Image (cartoon, rainbow, N blue to C red):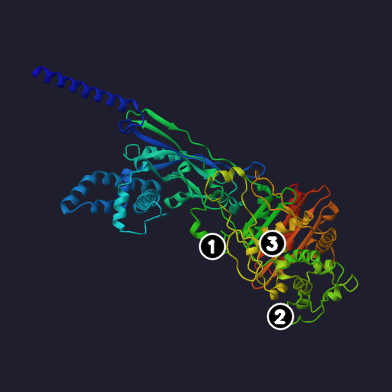
Amino acid sequence: MSNKRLKIFAIFCTLFAGVCILRLAYIQLNPHSVWQGQLEKIRTGKSTELNPLRGKILDRNGKILATNEACFTLGIDYRFARLADRRFWQVQLLKCSNETEREKVKAKFQQDYSTLNEIIALCAEFKKCTPEQITEMINKQINDPLWELRLYLAGKRKSPNQELEQTSGDANELLLAASEIDIAEMHQFQPLFKLENEDEVLAAQLKFIDIDGVEVQPGSERIYPYKDAASLVIGWVKPWNSTDQQNSDEDDKYSPGDMTGFCGIEYVCEPYLKGRQGKIVYSIDNEVVSRTERVPGGDVKLTIDIDLQNKTEDLLKNPNLNPVFGKAIGIVIIDVNSTDILTMASIPDFDLNTARQDYSKLLKGENQPLLNRVLNSYPPGSSAKPIILSAGLSDKKITPSEVISCPAAPAPTGWPNCMIFRTQNSSHDQLWEYEGGNNARNALRGSCNIYFSRLASRVEPETLQHWLYKFGFGQPALEIKDPAIIDSFRDRPVRKFPQPNGIISSSIPKVGNIPFEDLPPLDPEERKFFGIGQGNFRATPLQVANAFAAIARGGVFKYSRIIATQPADAGYNLNLSQQTLATIYDGMHAVVNEAHGTANAQFAGSGFEGKGIKVYGKTGSTEKPYHAWFAGFAKDSSGKEVVFVVLVEGGQHGGSDAGPLARDVVALCIEQGYLK
């Protein structure tokens, strides 16, 4: 009996041992087993994030507008930096239940705290500032971003479907939850300040050579070689923080210390410019366990000619050449054939290399330097009259030769007076008495308010709106449609340039792309003011430029582009008759080249006609608010053609305030080879 029991016991032991051996083999060989996961954690000592290399921004000729330069920074180990943060100590106290435990906490960090004070004192000596300023720098540049990220992650874990939970729930509870979040940056040196040159790098290495927790680190910074040129087009970068998390996904995640686009092309093309992080994972023996290579960001090539842009901005900043020096001005120049935006100048501007440090000052600056005048909306004034004439002629509400009388008398109540009557007590009837009267071409030539207010009132409100919409008003004028840049957003919304749609109705429409059918209606009584570009009518200089480019193109509307690799817009035909176009060309040519043309005095003596350059223009001015406009196009005998629009905030007269700048812009286009 005992032998039988012994055999059973032996069999049981053998089976049990077999099961154990099989199980051990499974967890050793199966790469997805829990044991292998734990073993991987044991093997892994630390990891290093490889920051992506941000792509460059180039002008149309390949000149660098934004790039990265190598630099050195002084970094502090977060182990010491955290001790300057009140939140760190708050968490420690929350974990203590009595005074004895609090004393133990103080004793635990006493040595590190003394080291931190030594670091702060040496940094203050090095930077020639106070210890308090260094402490503030540590909190602002190291502690705050890391805590924001940890709070963000804690909030997401608490409520995954919410964007951010920092403002809800118990503050101490969230703080404690955040303190349990361990991120890689907490185990790395964090940059404190930049070392400006090789001498500073050497001085820092010598000063901190024996100090634990301080390290001179190589890195890169964003540089803008042309400083203030095209500042509002290019934009600049800022340090990433957790509130930007919603704009990224796992493939292009950010870490504290990374830069992200803040405005302009840097912001709009952020995912494409940024690239993707890499990562090196080390074992506890400092051997590489795995390596993910970083993917460099793509370069963005603009249609902007930085030389033409620079010269245009220099013109605006020269008090001897700019008759309205000191006023805010926007200028846009477009190549008609390619749809390329060659220049988008907005004055005042600022140095992109210091914009981040000067942001608060810029935000409050006189004349709003952060406002892009080319993409801001204004009453277009008389610059809208060629479009109104297109609508009236195409809708057969008038013929080119028909006269609308402009007598030397006040207009009826509720109707606008003509400028010539208000300023000279004269009339266009008298002026054109022997030149065909106040017909279409002469009404453009003298910018007659009586003619265009009466003409607009003949066109049905919805028809007038429809013509304005077809000419690009009431909708965004500039969008990114480059396939590669769009693909970089993956499933996220594509970013857009901040720009108003303008207004072509009697009430303010909703924001965003609005189909024509969803626009608010135009009050019939307001048509007479739309006819002279006032009332509720609002447009951006770029919208006006696109509309004038359509006229210059023979009635084909195309959106302009600012990304050189973006396919040119296919556009659509406005179906303007040859007679309509000829009438508009004749009137706009007379504005510049004939006596009593509203810009003839400014262009007289320019010599453009003698050089084979034909200039067509339209002046404009508005009241309450006061702004001056000049919109036009110039073409040479070889077929080259540019459109240009000048907007002067606070300007009184389109001819005298904006006209001289428009004349000099044409000269610059000849100088740069865009007209021959």
Q: Quadrant of residue 545?
A: bottom right
Residue at 52% x, 41% y: name it.
54
Amino acid at dot 3: Tyr
**Discs 3, 2 touching: Cβ within 8 Å:** no
Amino acid at dot 2: Gly
Q: CA distance from mark 3 to mark 2?
A: 26 Å
Q: Nearer the viewer, mark 1 or mark 3?
A: 3
Q: Point out which mark residue 469 bears.
A: 3
Q: Nearer the viewer, mark 2 or mark 1?
A: 2
301 is higher (above) or lower (below) than 371 = above
Depth order, front residue of 576/238: 576
Query: Which residue in the structure is indicated by mark 2?
Result: 414
| 253 to the left or right of 441 | left
Residue furthest top in the image? 3
Query: Which residue in the structure is indicated by mark 1?
Result: 365
Q: Position of residue 286 (x, y in %)?
A: 35, 29
> Secondary structure under badge 2?
loop
Q: Earlier in the sequence, mark 1 or mark 3?
A: 1
521 is higher (above) or lower (below) than 333 = below
